[in-house]
Amino acid sequence: MQTRSRRRRLCRLGGIAAGAGVGIVGVLAPLSVAQAAAGERGYELVSPVDKSFSDIAETSSRIRATPSGDRVGFVSTGAFGDAQGTGAVAQYLARRGSGGWETKAITPRQQTGPGSSGNSTIYYDFTTDLGLGLTLVTNPPPVPTPTPDTQNLYVREDATGAFRLVTSLAPPVPDSGYAPIYAAASSDFSHVLFESNRALTPDATDDGLRKLYESVDGTVRLAGILPDGRVSTDETIAGVGASRGPTGGSLDPSQAETSRTISDDGSVVFFTAVPTPESGNGQIYARIDGTRTVHVTRSQRAVPDPGGTRPATFAGASQDGRTVYFTTTEQLLDADANGAADLYRFDTMDGGLTLVSVDSEPADGTNAIVQGVLGLSDDGDTIYFAAFGRLTLDARDLPAAPKLYQWHAGRLTYVSELSGADSTLWGGEYGTGRLVRVSSDGSAILFVSLESLNGYDNGGLFVGQVYLYRSGDAGPRCLSCMPSGTANVTDSSISSAASGIAGGTVGYEPRTLLNDGSQAYFMTANPLVSEDVNGKVDVYEYRPGTAELQLISSGTSAANSYFGDASEDGEDVFFVTRDRLSPRDRDSNLDLYNARVGAQNETPPPPGPTPCIGDECQGLPNVTPQLEPLPSGDADGSDGNLIEQPAAPKPSVRIVALGRGARSQLARSGRVVLRVRVSGAGQLLVTASTRVRALTATVARKTVRTKRAAVVRVTLRLARSARQALGRRGRHRVRFDAMLSSRGDNAVGAMTVTVEGRR
């Protein structure tokens, strides 16, 4: 077992209530040696030693551990080990055995070259034990299909490596516009929901509109059946829609959260009939056992709303499918006396409808104006939502600020105010990683807020910190804030994503909060304990029951570390880092580690520099560099040939300053050609990092091999998120870092530029 023993870096996070709804100001006090030793963890190297200079992607939603922590899935930008080859990212599964962690590739062999789809290698979902995985495959198909050269969904069985076709009905001829979009599945994958705008069943209309289908043990049927047995003539989608795209054209994943649109046993399917194409709201229905349909959003007022029928938005459901939540401005009950957006709860078994966002403080004249749902418990008895209205007497009177409420079994509790910029918490999208997590029992909520909820200085505008609220607390507690109460060094998060296609997130939410809320995990560069000395992002664990704060990553790495996932009991915590925590780890690439309680001790790695650059060191498979000649003092040295330079005792690297034209191109297209002067042969890693959604992130990277001293031309294209941020702000700072690794030594160089774009 490849481990490195370490004591828990613990502090107690204590505090006193600062007033109802304001929060708790935390102070740190060190634990005794005996207390620290009681929770000793060891580091296990999970990813293989030989990764062909590839990085393990730090995208949180694509690192998935089993509840026991003995298996974990992850992705990489390169193929290694037994991978058969892929045009994009490769998916791996690792299992812990008596001799350590063993890894195998599970990405099916895919055609590469012009026209090949990078997204075809994504595994969208797994069963809890990782025994089954669901993926989209194009060509060649892993099993014979009715229509070759057509994308289809498949389920892979890990025990045998066999694939099963899910979308057994496809267009009769190859169709480049046909791409089934995965929405959700039952816990055993016997029922799979997907969307398509093609008519795949005899009762479906070939009108180019989105349609929701259900595959039951490989047999496809239409899900959008109305209560009277008619097929809906509107678009039918899972929740707010798993897909988007023009009518009749090819669909793309919407990255909307749709995992709760089917019950665990597959007996209940929730769909929305959308009268306006490309919309995400309409009338919501529950299709039960594939035989009958219940109208969820039907009015139950004695006199229907004078304003008429209005669209509703799906907001979540319990795992058993009995309880479903939605928002609407239509007054569906007599108790709803206003036309503001409200939150409702519907029981699919008895047909009961409940108004959740009841205004218990009507004297102030404000209505609920519900913004959205942050999350709910597995049984559906507890839900957290945001609303502008002052719904309880103890809610702060801040009309311009949304407020966080908890509803549990008929009781409404005010939690805290939020920032208007926190809308991603209830936006229902996982495209950039969800920044909120509700415990399975609903007793706790972990979230990132841009609002200073307990009087701390968050560290600047659009800088988020991590907060935890547990039922019965006076307010949320800031976990990532500096214990001294001084301004925070940087933003913090519970989610991360790599740049490029490896940053493509999926709907899985890692266990940043355990099922009972007893342990929480987050990432921050704020030095919360004395052992955190690197000024980089590190992974922390917090235990609210004992107010213990633990450093999971080393706190000494020269690069950022990222939380991946945790086991159900929290004894296994997976994270990605460049830190060499195992003596076998000899490269400068990102690896997946497990900090496990009770792991075997291992001799620490030999001392030496940990190669890293910038805020986010990244690497990619090698590509051939473009070289420019170094300037020569010879009169005839301008013939364009490479000029050999004597080897320097130590490597050196420098990024040549960008000219006005290069800056203009970067602002206009997000593309830049850097000229990097290197002293000799080696491996050159170049990255670009900037702030995206209040988080510092790597937005471009490339690794090249250099053969001699030269000026190397490296082309980078910023990730879409960075280009969008530039478009919103008009002015953006981008940092470029370069590291040359040669003969066991490393040299680093950096340059920061400010680019001006058009708003």
Image (cartoon, helix red, strand yellow):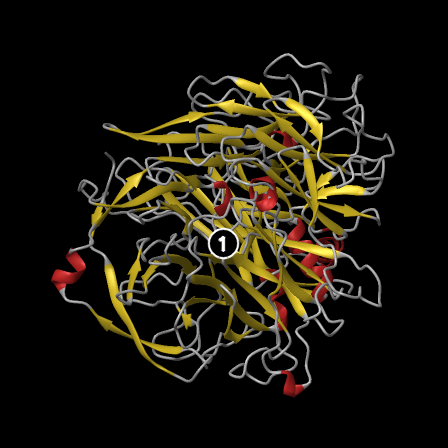
The residue that mark 1 highlights is 495
* Residue drawn at x 41%, y 33% as measured from the top left: 129
The image position of residue 199, as x and y in percent, is 80, 28
Q: Tell me if mark 1 has few (under 14), some (14-19) or many (20+) residues whose alpha carbon lies within 10 angstroms of its own.
A: many
The image position of residue 637, as x and y in percent, is 63, 40
- In the image, 516 versus 126, the foreground residue is 516
Q: Is residue 183 left or right of residue 38?
A: right
Q: Is residue 176 left or right of residue 459?
A: right
Q: Where 320 sits versus 355, above or below?
A: above
* Residue drawn at x 78%, y 26% as measured from the top left: 176
Number of numbered discs visible in the structure rendering: 1
Residue 51 visible: no
Q: Where 187 sits versus 380, above or below?
A: above
The image position of residue 519, as x and y in percent, is 34, 57
- Indicate the quadrant containing the C terminus: top left, top right, bottom left or bottom right: bottom right
Q: Where 206 sits versus 571, above or below?
A: above
Q: Amino acid at mark 1?
A: Ser
Q: Secondary structure at mark 1?
A: loop
- In the image, 45 versus 611, the foreground residue is 45
Most distant residue in the right direction: 207
Most distant residue in the left direction: 34
- In the image, 121 versus 668, the foreground residue is 121
Residue 128 visible: yes
- Indicate the quadrant containing the N terminus: top left, top right, bottom left or bottom right: top left
Q: Is residue 713 left or right of residue 541?
A: right
Q: Is residue 107 left or right of residue 71?
A: right
